[in-house]
Amino acid sequence: MLAACCSTKAGKRSHKLNMRILLTNHFPFHGSGTGTYVRDLATMLSSLGHEVRALIVDCAAGGRSSTMLAHREDPCMTTRIVCRVDDRDADLDFDFPCFTAHPYSQNTFGCLSNAQMSAYVAVTSNKLRWVVESFGPDIVHCQHIWLQASALEGLPVPFVISAQGTDLMGYAAYPQFRGSARRAAVRAGRILAASEYIRERVVETFTGLEDKVETVLSAIDTALYESAHGSREVILKQLGLPVSAGPLVAFVGKLVRFKGPDLMIEAARIYGRADHDICTVLCGDGPLRPSLENSVQEMKRGKIWFLGDRQICDRAALLHLADVLVIPSRMEPFGLVALEAMASGTPVLATRAGGLCEIVNDRIGGLIEPDSPHSLARGVLRAISEGWKASKGRAAKEYVRNRHNGNAWVAKLEKVYRNVIEART
């Protein structure tokens, strides 16, 4: 192997540079933590001289003609499995399936009919085979212990899988896919867990594979979050918020139950009574949005805004401006948005749920018990009254730079790739 791995302009082989790496994801680059993971990883690997391609599922315009279309925001050359309802030019004429929900789709793997499932598997296998044969990757890095990884069966290329946590939710919820997921896990060269919490769940779920599972804490490309975003007034106008807004409490994420946005609304009802100046901003979309908006209308008090799904530049601006980011999740495999907030110099108030305990502490934010709007409200009032933004913001930035450094993260992944390639050879 290492055929393409390491070719230089002089035609020599270097064991350090120019691996050909294919990244795959069941979702678009935008709208989920996994999309952010793949986008940032592609960007950083490319900057180090590796040849990177991506295979993603998307609803982007262009149909089959977009197979190798490099959209302006793409971090690398990208092949898309295009899903769009009632579009004969798309690869699949239904919304792409998710484990829980996505801003672009509320379809789930459990909602697929037998015919849709067969079509999804067939298109995935065909596109993956085409990319592998045309690009000739030295290694494939799949996101999720799921269908894309299982579709590599029979292809002569080593692969690793990042378990992101939502795939384990899918494994529990949709038993019809467990056989494929298990085969993928068995064949993978390594299974990488984004947190220790996920590693433990993978070991519990896929018994007998503990020796190939390791934790590689996720990181982010901090450049966008550390850069200047304009004055407070400029950002408020950019986001469509009143320039007279008081302290900002932000929620950024999918509006689904396990993320706890309903707890955010209930907490806002409570802390709004104590401090009428606090403004609550929910950035994201999902199936709970209509009911949440109805709840806000019935409250008759509090300053709560729904921004909907926003592009990364708007999310970064909101995180930069917010006094505190709140993550009220009932369960959270990792919580990449916590790193984005901290890189912006914004402290994080999170629940002791899943992997959040591994990345949030009292020095850079605070932890509360899950499923308790009263604890959440008290935490918000404390963060505002104690001025966490001023007292903990700098430490939060340093924490991300030191513990979730993108260069260190990519170096670990490079080492994993080379070990798996060599073992396969």
Image: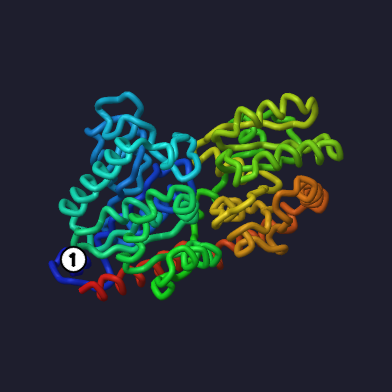
Say if residue 18 shows up in the picture: no
Of the 4 image quadrants, the one containing the N terminus is bottom left
On the picture, is 424 further left or further right than 294?
left
Picture coordinates of residue 148 (x, y %)?
A: 31, 51
Q: What residue is shown at x 18% (from left), y 62% (from top)?
A: 156
305 or 330, which is in the foreground?
Answer: 330
Report the amino acid beneath label 1: Ser
Residue occupying image coordinates x 33% and y 55%: 180
Q: Position of residue 282 (x, y in %)?
A: 63, 37
Residue position for label 1: 7
Task: Find numbered disc 1 in the image and state the secondary structure of the residue it sits on.
Answer: loop
Above-or-below relation of 187 to 231? below
Crowd rating for badge 1 (residues with CA inside 10 Å; few <14, some 14–19, many 20+): some
- Residue in front for this viewpoint, 366 or 70: 366
The answer to whether 371 appears left or right of 412 in the picture is: right
Q: Residue furthest right?
A: 274
